[in-house]
Image (tube, rainbow, N blue to C red):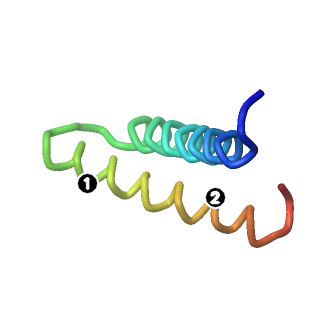
Amino acid sequence: MAHPMATRALVAGGELLAWWAALTGLWIVLISAVDTLERVTGTLAALLAACAACAARRASGRR
């Protein structure tokens, strides 16, 4: 049986990864040309937005 803290950490990590993947995919669809700097910037911006989305969901009380 898995430890409850480990399970919650895996779920939170999965949620963050899902948000990041969705936001990065959206960013790629919306831009026209991708160079290295844009790729790094978009990936980091998507990670920040994913963290904000996870925090907003937790703050809304839905778990």
Going by the numbered disc 2, the residue's amino acid type is Cys
Residue drawn at 69 percent across, 68 percent down: 56
Q: Residue at x 15, y 39 (%)?
A: 35
> Residue 14 falls in which quadrant of the image?
top right
Q: Is residue 17 above or below residue 63?
A: above
Residue at mark 2: 54
The amino acid on which the numbered mark 1 sits, given as a three-letter code, is Thr
Instruction: In this rendered view, identify the residue nearer to me: 58 or 38.
Output: 58
Does 25 sit left or right of 15 as displayed? left
Residue identifier under label 1: 41
The C terminus lies in quadrant: bottom right
Residue 19 screen position, x and y as percent: 57, 45
Q: x and y percent of residue 53 in the render?
A: 62, 60
Q: Disc 1 or 2, which lies upstream in sequence?
A: 1
Mark 2 burial class by Cα count in 10 Å: few <14, some 14-19, many 20+: some
Residue 59: quadrant of the picture: bottom right
Placement of the N terminus among the 4 image quadrants: top right
Q: Which element is circle 1 on?
A: helix
> Is 52 on the left-hand or right-hand side of 39?
right
Q: Count the marks: how many?
A: 2
Say which of 8 and 23 sits in front.
8
Q: Kindly identify which numbered label has been placed on residue 25.
A: none
- How many angstroms separate mark 1 from mark 2 (CA)? 20 Å
Viewer-nearest of discs 1 and 2: 2
